[in-house]
Image (cartoon, coloured by chain):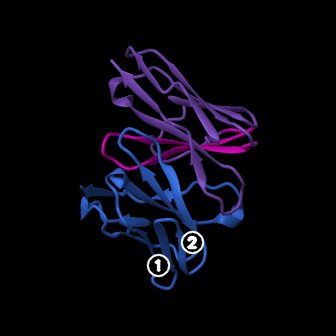
Chain colours: A purple, B blue
């Protein structure tokens, strides 16, 4: 069964508004979670690494003030897309290692964001 | 040179045939290797992982790793139309540091023709 839960599955919002996406580890504690983004017919791109109790680490080219990450507990990380624009429309996916060191990444079901 | 390379495809095989998906990686220090399947509009799901040179079999799937050649492959036997998807190769560059993201290839699109 699923080990990482992501909510919502899809969201449509108006340009200029903010959207929050939640990612939960279901039966394990995740001190680190990873947020990916995927545009249609393109590869997964890592956006940021979410660290429980500390600041997220963002990949080059990802605006930290636009994509706010909060990892307030060992089972929950949130990604907030602030002042969303149509070009932010994408598939956002969170993931976590169930066990550290050499283990696979488990992905949430993803969130399809459409900004109108 | 890209870190993880895959042929984008599409790779078309007839139903019942063996599909062979290939992946090369650039970092010799990579220790663990993963194959994910991604259906259109869905998130990736783990198919197999392999850490040691050689073959690893799980049902219709066989992962093959050759660290000397920096090459990892996935074989799908008795291919079914439901196997039609994009297959992502992923590599963990630095597993000893604990929680690290995986580096993904761009994926190979497989089409199994009934």
Residue B70 - label: 1
Query: Is B89 on the left-hand or right-hand side of A33?
Result: left
Tell me: residue A96, above or below residue B56: above
Q: Earlier in the sequence, mark 1 or mark 2?
A: 2
Depth order, front residue of B84/A8: B84
- Residue placed at 38% from the left, 14% from the top? A14
Give SS at disc 2.
Answer: loop
Q: Which residue is mark 2?
A: B30
| Residue A99, image quadrant | bottom right
Stretch of the chain drawn in magenta: A29-55
| Residue A5, image quadrant | top right
Residue B2 visible within the image:
no
Residue A30 visible within the image:
yes
| Quadrant in the picture for the C terminus of chain A | top left
Q: Pointer 2 indicates a residue of which chain?
A: B
| Quadrant in the picture for the N terminus of chain A | top right
Tell me: residue A91, above or below residue B89: above
Give SS at disc 1.
Answer: loop
């Amino acid at each position: 069964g699923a080990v990482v839960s992501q909510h919502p599955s899809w969201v449509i919002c108006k340009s200029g508004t903010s959207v929050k996406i939640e990612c939960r580890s279901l039966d394990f504690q995740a001190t680190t979670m990873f947020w990916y983004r995927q545009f249609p017919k393109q590869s997964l791109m890592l956006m940021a690494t979410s660290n429980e109790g500390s600041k997220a680490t963002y990949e080059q080219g990802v605006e930290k003030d636009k994509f706010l990450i909060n990892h307030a507990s060992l089972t929950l990380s949130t990604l907030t897309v602030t002042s969303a624009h149509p070009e932010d429309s994408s598939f956002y996916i969170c993931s976590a290692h169930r066990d550290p060191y050499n283990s696979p990444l488990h992905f949430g079901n993803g969130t399809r964001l459409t900004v109108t | 040179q890209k870190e993880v390379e895959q042929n984008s495809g599409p790779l078309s095989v007839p139903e019942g045939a063996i599909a062979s998906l290939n992946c090369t990686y650039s970092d010799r220090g990579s220790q663990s290797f993963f194959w994910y399947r991604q259906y259109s509009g869905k998130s990736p799901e783990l198919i197999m992982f392999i850490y040691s040179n050689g073959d690893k079999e799980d049902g219709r799937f066989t992962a093959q790793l050759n660290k000397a050649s920096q090459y990892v492959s996935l074989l799908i036997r008795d291919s079914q139309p439901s196997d039609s998807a994009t297959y992502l190769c992923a590599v963990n560059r630095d597993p000893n540091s604990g929680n690290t993201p995986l580096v993904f290839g761009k994926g190979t699109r497989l089409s199994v023709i009934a």
